[in-house]
Image (cartoon, rainbow, N blue to C red):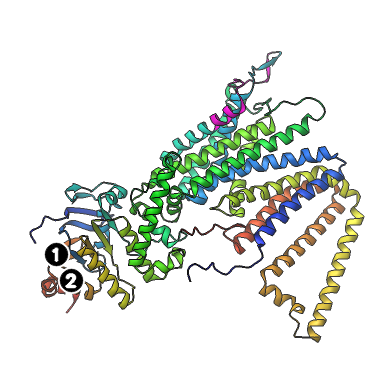
Amino acid sequence: MDARPLLTVSEVEKAFGGIHAVDRCSLAVLPKTITGLIGPNGAGKSTLFNIIAGLYRPDGGEIRFNGTRIDGLPPYEIVDLGLTKTWQIPHELRNLTVLENVVLAAKHNSGEHLLNLFARPRQVKADEKQWRARAREILKLTQLDGLANEHARALSGGQKKLLELSRALMSDPTLVLLDEPVAGVNPALAGSLMDLIENLRRGGRTFFLIEHDMNVVMNRCDWVIVMHQGRRIAEGPPESVRANATVIESYLGG
Amino acid sequence: MSDRPPPTSEIPWSGIVVFSVIGGIVLIGILSAAIAGATPKGILTNLGFYVSIAIVFAILALGFNLQWGYTGLFNAGIAGFYLIGAYVAAFAITPPAPPIIVGGVVVFPGHLGGFSLPLPVGMVLAMLAAGATAAVVAVPALRLRADYLAIATLAFAVILQIATTNLQSITGGSIGITGIPPPIQYEGTDAQFLNAMTLVGVGALILLASILVLQFMAESPWGRVLRAIREDEEATMALGKNTFNYKLQAFAIGGALMGLAGALYGVTLGYLSPASSFAPSVTFSVWVMVIVGGSGNHRGAIVGAFLIYGMEWISVQVRDQAVLGLAANYVLMRDVFLGLGVNALVALGLIFVLGRLRPGLAWAHPLALCRRSAVVRGVVLTAFAVYGVGWAFILVEQFAPSAVGDTIFYTRLMLIGVLLILLIVYRPEGILRERKRVLR
């Protein structure tokens, strides 16, 4: 692991009232890996993801992505740089169709600028056509193509997770933060979802994921980071983390 | 399997309801005027007024629909943007109006402006002023959570209305602005009729243009981002959209449309006064129009405007015209309603007996039918409502004849309230629901 990290989090802090959700946490994610983030409930994992994605402003510390400092940037600029996150509880846009949900996630769709609608109607049409085709490809990949024109609210819990992933892929990210991608997904689908993620990793993308399913963490991750009470308490390859006494005590149990 | 539309009833009930109710409104209007002895041209002038003002409300509803129906921004200050448009246009297009002073007392205050500009210029200025104000109000207000946005905009509208009433030297104060020129100045006996028809034409053109432009904008990738913000702003932001910019644009464009409605309103009426035309109740009416008509689609906003303003208009028509005629026929009405009641009782009794004799007959179980079919339920409810209103009318007429007109006038608020409750219970998405956008 001699590559330079894609994402570095240094001494990041976030408090809600008296609770230090993230307490001077530092970690790094190497490019083209699947890095797992585990830890007990309330360890600050989701909060850290929200901070990295720009949805929360950290109280202190520094975050660098691809060399650029991103803490304090609004979420849409972070997406622009190539970092996208999915939600633990799916945030599907309920009354939009599945296809609309995915097309919406495209970056640089000229029709999303009001003036272009009037000034460059042709380019708007061409762009939209191209993005729709791309969205359909992604939906085929995530096996949602049969539901493209259904309202997103009609999807099952597991399908909504797939929709989250589809939208994340649509923005063509370098790094994807996945918040519990397989929680609530049936084992067969979870398996194919993780296969898909491994394939995409081979294609050059990096995944940083929170997961409680030890099967996924131990078998699919290259590197595992353990958080407890807002701090990183251990990290390493899955086998070594599994053997770590502190981790067993705080999370995995005897 | 996904390409098949979901099963829907073959009969377009929503369309039938819309057309029959609006048709009913027009019919009652014509009847009222006829009872009062109006000429055909008088009746048309009257109807033209209804259509013109309904168009003004339709444009207001379109503006609010873009803000709330598409983007989820609950604007409670519609009346404020409407007021700005109305006054800016009036300043631009009216001739100069210095105050008239009789014996040292200002009998008729002047107002700002008096530029005698052409109507289209006035309308563009109204849109720019209202749109710019909306943008300025939006910058702080859109950072607030939804319910606080409503409070902030409501406060804005109320402040504006009070300021307009009191800034006499600029706005003409509570007397307002008179002598706003119509689109075309007619002379002669038919002037009123011709003016009404011109206003309907101008209004219809503006409404049509607004719909076309809005449809083009809102059903584009841009509009899709607005709908995404309505569904979940945080998620939309995490999908890489600068949601604040979109909200600002939607709010400003909606505000500009409200300004356009204001300009049209001033021209239609020929005068402006801030007391009732720009009260918060205007805002509430527009909400009801969009909720009843169905949010998230332009047709719904227009239908809602014609329906709800139609109810207001009818109540005025009935008060001013029909009551005189109907009161004279009080005995006839009483007999008709009595007869209807007796007949209904007999019919119910027969159905009951038949149901006992032939248990297999579905139609002989009215309650079971009511439970099973929404249509039967609707018909029965409507019948009871008509019957009840009829009797209420007769009773009030019997005990307080002079109060009938006012009673009907104020009953409209109650009726609108009942309609709103029924609609929210049975059809929360409004008469015309938002369509699913099937992308190819």
Q: Determine whether, in the image, residue B73 is placed left or right of residue B329.
A: left
Residue situated furthest left in the rendering: A2
Q: Toward the viewer: A111 or B46?
A: A111
Span shown in magenta:
B104-126
Q: Where is residue B428 in the image (x, y as percent from the top left)?
A: 57, 60
Q: Name the residue under label 1.
A: A233
Q: Which amino acid does label 1 sit on?
A: Ile
Q: Determine whether, in the image, residue A106 is placed left or right of residue B1.
A: left
Residue at horizontal 64%, vertical 35%? B265
Q: In which quarter of the image is residue A46?
A: bottom left
Rendered position, A109 above or below B168: below
Q: Toward the viewer: A193 or B2?
A: B2
Q: Toward the viewer: A122 or B205?
A: A122
> Does residue B118 show up magenta in the picture?
yes
Label pair 2/1, CB-CB below 8 angstroms: yes
Which secondary structure, mark 2? Answer: helix
Q: Quadrant of residue B85?
A: top right
Residue at horizontal 84%, vertical 72%? B345
- Which chain is mark 1 on? A
Q: Name the residue under label 2.
A: A250
Residue at horizontal 86%, vertical 69%? B343
> Does residue A119 show up magenta in the picture?
no
Q: Determine whether, in the image, residue B10 is placed left or right of residue A144.
A: right
Q: Dot 2, how many residues are within 10 Å of its Cα: few (below 14), some (14-19), or many (20+)?
A: some
Which secondary structure, mark 1? Answer: strand
Q: Toward the viewer: A189 or B127?
A: A189
- Which chain is mark 2 on? A
First in residue order: circle 2 vs circle 1: 1
